[in-house]
Amino acid sequence: MSWWRNASIYQVYLRSFADGNGDGIGDLAGLRARLSHIANLGFDAIWLNPWYPSPLADGGYDVADYRDIEPVFGSLADAEKLIADAHGLGLRVIIDIVPNHCSDQHPWFKEGLWDRFHIRDTEDLPNDWKSRFGGPAWSKLPDGRWYLHLYAAEQPDFNWENPAVEKEFEDILRFWLDRGVDGFRIDVADGLVKDFSRPDADQPYSDQDGVHEIYRSWRKIVDSYDGDRILVGEMWLPDPVRFARYLRPDEMHSAFNFDFLCCPWNAQELRKVVDDTLAAHEPVGAPPTWVLSNHDVTRHVTRYGREKTGFSFADRQHGAPTDFELGTRRARAAIMLTAALPGGVYVYQGEELGLWEVEDLPDELREDPVWHRSGFTDRGRDGCRVPLPWSAEDGPSWLPQPANWQQFSVAAQTGDPGSMLELYRQVFAQRRAITGDLEWLDLGENVLAFRRGDHTCVVNLSGAPIDLPGTPTLSSIPLTNGQLPHDAAAWLS
């Protein structure tokens, strides 16, 4: 079986992972020094958020040069050493590619190669499209014409009707494949093709049919390299059937399953998402992926401790009351549920430490363009991007850590059998043995239970302890008189 069909992949937000030179910013040297942390957790691959030269108007998703490394992180030679080190530890390397937009500091934009962007010469706003970061999706060039940016004004959208854009990205893919990367996570994968004839309400900048031809050509490129290289899509789409079209055998290998991430902590809703996900993927023969948190969303320890346990960009519930102990307890159960499902699993850095969303950052330190473009009403995504605590000797960091995070550091949790870190180590050590199709078991309406081969997973979302149909090999918290407590999970073999 191809490695990516059931891979465990660890997401590295490089700027906040590990600082190798003491300047408070994570870098390639820090990541190389800590690769063993990821390998020892039992992961198969790492996915890195953008590491390219960037003015950081949007956390690196405003790329100025797709064939180099941001100097704050290191050099191209450092990236090549990282890939070699990772491969030496049995870790594959997936990097972010950002094909929908670039930085306004990209040479094409600075040199005025306007046919490679969406430019309009009108008196008023060309149309009613809105930026996903707030405000209109159009800004003016110095000559008075408008350019399109579905995100920040510093992120002009590429015009994919121009063959030069298509050729450029095919060359970029080859550049990194030649350096040994094992795949690409495609940012805003649904957004490259736009239909300007349709109104904003129709989402004419998302999921247009023409986008599939792009990924068919990309698939031919990655397939031409040895070593099972992959394409992973980021698409926030409401229709699971249209979502699955990106995963046809000649397009992407897999894509993020955001319905699962957004789902509330509720047995019926979780089961429906699992069933719908498996049903959507089955006709195209693609494996699903499961993810609880990432660099864009409120950390799930915080979400699961709230009255509303789901996630929505429209309402981040910033500052809503959170029961940290309950959120942690549910997060422990959630990773056991997630890791037992068929397909691939993504873990966002810091999840394994039980870190929560830092919601009390000083406003003057916030960098997310969402904060600025929302008129300082949406506090954005900085709270999930605070650098990781490694030990009590950690130096300063570009976003301040909560004072008590040292108690949650890698050093503090290592060897503590009750810690989140040691639970993750056990979960991912045992996960590879769980194989086979999913078969639901009936243990009550507020209990999720299923069998895969010789393994059974039980998650108790009811308010009371339940009996287990066997002896557990692992539980998210200790059993009570032989019963599985509420908001807990167990694996049985």
Image (spheres, helix red, strand yellow):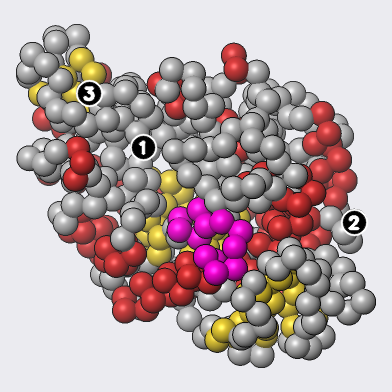
Closest to the observer, 54 or 273: 273
- Label 2, label 1: how many angstroms apart (C-alpha)? 42 Å
Q: Which mark is residue 416?
A: 2
Magenta region, main secondary structure: helix
Element assignment for label 2: loop
| Residue 399 visible in the picture | yes
Pointer 1 local density, CA inside 10 Å: few below 14, some 14–19, many at least 20: many
Residue 464: image location, x then y, percent: 78, 69
Element assignment for label 3: strand
Part of the protein shown in magenta: 258-270
Q: Which of marks 2 and 1 is nearer the N terminus?
A: 1
Q: Can you identify the residue that label 1 sits on?
A: 66
Query: Which residue is at 52% across, 47% downward?
Result: 311
* Amino acid residing under circle 1: Tyr
Q: Between tags 3 and 2, which lies in front?
A: 3
- Label 3, label 2: how many angstroms apart (C-alpha)? 53 Å
Q: Can you identify the residue that label 3 sits on?
A: 138
- Label 3, label 1: how many angstroms apart (C-alpha)? 24 Å
